[in-house]
Amino acid sequence: MPYAQWGYHPELGRGLERFEEYFPADFISEAIDQTRGWFYTLMAEGVLLFDSTAYGTVVCLGHLVDRDGRKMSKSLGNTVDAFEVMDRQGADALRWFLLTGGSPWSPRRVSMQMFDDVVRQFLLPLWNVYAFFVTYANASGFDPSDGDVAVERRPLLDRWVLSQLSRTEAVAHDGLQAYDATGAGRRIAAFVEDLSNWYVRRARRRFWDPADYGGDDVRAAFLTLHTCLVSLSQLLAPFTPFVAETLWRNLAAGRNAAPDSVHLSDYPNADGRLVNPALDDSMAAVRQIVELGRRVRTETKVRVRQPLLEAVVHYAGDHAALEPLLDLVAEELNVKQVLFAESAEQLGRWRAKPNFKVLGPRLGPGVKDAATALEREDGSLAAALAHGETVRLDAGGDQIELAPGDVELVQETIEGWGVASDGGITVALELELTPELQSEGLARELVRAVQDARKAAGLDVGDRIVLGLRLEGPAVEALGTHRRWIADETLAVDVVDGAAPGATFEQTFEIDGAAVGVSLRQA
């Protein structure tokens, strides 16, 4: 094949130039059963005839097996029909799984459920981001050619996601150049996760914020998300060509001399000027803080829509670098303020108990003295162990050396607070609720109910409404205090008690055990 495809006939003087240009081949890929067949044959012939390998890069693919690890066989009835996959989930889901679902040289388990997971975990989040952008861009009349907002003038969140995009472009470009489609695809998947679950979450309000509609902050958000989606369409073109083409044709084709098809455009090259390592590190710390705060809410069963007074953070890194990002933490954790603590011990005392499986064989009966000594110590030794240090403990007159793995650590929280720690970061949330906080929490629940009703009524995101709320109990007071805010959040030109005049849609919800009637009509 390496010679025949170029019509290589040295005895006739034909095909020599093309052969010399393209031999040896850059790349070859076959399954593992061709190791002693095709791979070896080509290599042996190349060495014997030309003193050269026949190919420069080889990927030896593993076999596909069923979900239980058995070789696929028609007689066993455990095969997966590729055309059935494409009919059910699309060719892009099939391609994405085969390219990124595991090391190409390893056996790959395949089932319909796995292709469903590709759609649910990757393609749907990507499409939801795209649909979000298109919905609000159409509602606001956004046109990317109307003017730019310099990157250095955009909010830190925008600069962070553009830094992540540039890093992704570099990894994907270099990965494909090195025939590592799996590594390139997984980096793209990580970026889609960042875009969906952090950038859009935190920038969502900017796309429709009445206070800055048409201003630079709103335009920066649209420009940033547009840039990310256009680049993603190019990054994904070799992986998911149909989804990539759909994004490109709607967002980029024909603009600024862009070709009609993404497959006619150049693969992205990273703009290193956008990479901001310090901002990337700070945002990673912020996201870890948020994750710990969410853990506290989950463990203490405090719902996210319930505002809290404050979060206190112990962070050993540069506080000044995090200060400009604390608003993101406050918004995501729904707290009024975020403060720094000088030490984790301010947020709760550490207590250590012997790990009897480890210390029992080592200390024998002396493990009881160690347990007594740990129970009586003031928490300083436990704190040192929590920070990964080794300590010496006086147990019954004997000096015992303890490492973190020798004990079980428990953090005793301050009453009225919830605490979570990981990786050198500790986060505490004040859980006591004032009447004002409870009222605001109810108002947020009312907004959620109205937004659900708007969606069920089939309204567009920009439609104004007349809203009626039929309430009882504490929700009545919450509406009285937060009526204007509820109206702004739900695009209501009027909020009335009881049924909305001429309501075209009604729905009943339950909030804190009380019935809430929502009625509305388009204004």
Image (spheres, rainbow, N blue to C red):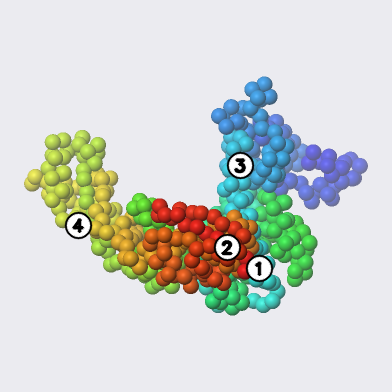
Mark 3 vs mark 4, foreground winner is 3
Q: CA distance from mark 1 to mark 4?
A: 58 Å
Residue shown at 16%/46% (left/top)?
Answer: 400
* Up/down of 19 relative to 282, above or below: above
Find the distance from the CA under tag 2 to the CA under tag 4: 60 Å
Label 4, residues with CA under 10 Å away: few <14, some 14-19, many ≥20: some
Q: Which residue is mark 1?
A: 139
Horizontal and vertical percent for residue 186?
57, 50
* Residue 374 is at least partly visible in this image: yes
Pointer 4: what residue?
A: 380
| Residue 57, percent from left and from top | 66, 45
Residues marked 2 and 4 touching at CB (< 8 Å) = no
Point out residue 504 in the picture as x, y percentages from the top left corner: 62, 60
In the image shown, does 422 or 477 lie closer to the viewer?
477
Q: Earlier in the sequence, mark 2 or mark 3?
A: 3
Q: For residue 116, which numbered disc appears in the image? A: 3
Horizontal arrangement in the rendering, residue 415 relative to residue 61 (left or right): left
Mark linked to residue 520: 2
Q: Is residue 223 above or below residue 30?
A: below
